Image (cartoon, rainbow, N blue to C red):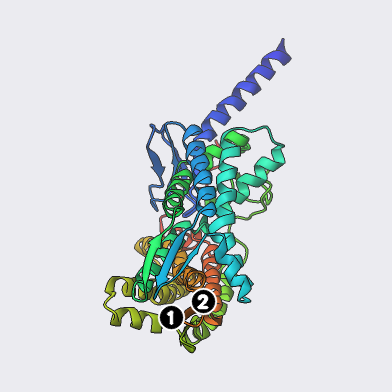
Amino acid sequence: MVCSHESHKQQSHAMHGERQQDNLILCPQCDMLVALPPLQSGSKAVCPRCKTTLSARWAEPRKQPIGFALSALFMLVLANIFPFINMRVAGLGNEIKLIQIPQVMVAEDYASMATLFMVFVQLIPAFCMLAIILLCARVRLPRQWKIWMAKVLFQLKTWCMVEIFLAGVLVSFVKLMAYGDIGIGSSFIPYCLFCLLQVRAFQCVDRRWLWQDIEPAPLIEQPLQVGRTGLRQGVRSCSCCTAILPAQQSKCPRCHTVGYVRRLHSLQWTMALLVTSIILYIPAMLMPIMITEALGNKMPSTVMAGVVLLWGEGSYPVAMVIFIASIMVPSLKMLAIGWLCLDANGKGKAKADSERMHLIYEVVEFVGRWSMIDVFVIAVLSALVRMGQLMSIYPDIGALLFAMVVILTMFAAMAFDPRLTWDRANETIKKEPQGDGK
């Protein structure tokens, strides 16, 4: 009876600990331990310090993402089957399908550009939608497969550039209107719907809920205090599944991701990627990104030349979009990343500094990938404008260099650990008792 009583007591304690820890989360941006309140349908929980969204609750956490993802995949199939856009110049016409865009670039010896298009616009979005369906529908799969899909899903989310490509198509329309008549094909509307549906599918999938559905988070033995950072309490957050782990435990028992209290050599990796992107940025701006061949005359065009041309033709809004996305954003992003690294390595004292730097980091994370819009514009123009000697457009080396700049700056932002900016603020607040768990 004693053994039975003790066993019941331990089970009760374990269940109590599990219930107590289920609502705790370490903010991935500022490392603050937060107790999540009970969420109503359609509401979300944000970190009280850095305002990062920590969790969200949807009315139908399974049905909504499955419905949106299934619809998105169906629209993607339709978008690849039928003609996408067409153009008519001086009695000559040409139309393309989405699937033909990389084929044209491969034919012009730009397989690297074709690969970027296929990966960012077709393959990654399709895989993510399929992963959402399989995970949310609880399809019977080996546990390791589910863990792998969930890990890849959230890692690839940033690289889905469907909406950026669609914006590039709209910019291409404005550029081509000066040369001839532009029309949309049967697959243009399905692709627009695919863009909206895949964005909505991502919004309806909460990372914390999905991982809890795959497998409950591992229990942690030590007591935790809400409102203090994980660094001060000797715990860390898994960068993949958000589980709270002891600081010395490098491998997460749930998702098997290897991690540390802070990303190893975060500033060094960020600065190395940043310097490389700056080195590539100079020739990317100076070298032509595309060549326009009209009546046998070849006219190379740089990024800035394209902005000047659009401005001179009176397309002021489009010229501003290209200037901001292709010139201003990459330049400011590189400056901002350098500033973040210097700040994280400095000795700032004001909490406001951390809040301001965190805002800069969020802006960098959000706008960085939109610089790919110019690369997608070139992809559309190269595939559509094929009129023989009358007029043809080809990509050039500058486009590939510019795409590499955008990709490297995205990797630089990912390598930077935003918690480093808040670690400085922690040093300036009043010393807290370390607590012995009593």
Task: Tell me the amino acid under the disc marked 2.
Answer: Phe
Q: Give the answer, above or below, for where 95 lies relative to 332.
A: above
Residue 387 position in % (x across, y down): 48, 76
The image quarter in which residue 15 lies: top right
Check disc 1 and report the residue beneath it: 303
Mark closer to the observer (2, 1): 1
* Residue 358 at least partly seen: no
Secondary-structure class at tag 1: helix
Q: Quadrant of the C terminus?
A: top right
Q: Quadrant of the N terminus?
A: top right
Of pointers 2 and 1, the one earlier in the residue sequence: 1
Residue 404 position in % (x across, y down): 56, 74
Q: Nearer the viewer, residue 153 or 215?
A: 153
Residue 432 position in % (x across, y down): 46, 50
Residue 234 position in % (x across, y down): 58, 49
The residues tagged by marks 2 and 1 sit, at their Cα atoms, a distance apart of: 9 Å
Left or right of 5 in this view: 197:
left
Q: Residue at x 51, y 86 (%)?
A: 287
* Residue 191 at least partly seen: yes
**Do the residues under discs 2 and 1 have CB atoms within 8 angstroms?**
yes
Check disc 2 and report the residue beneath it: 402
Task: Tell me the amino acid under the disc marked 1.
Answer: Val
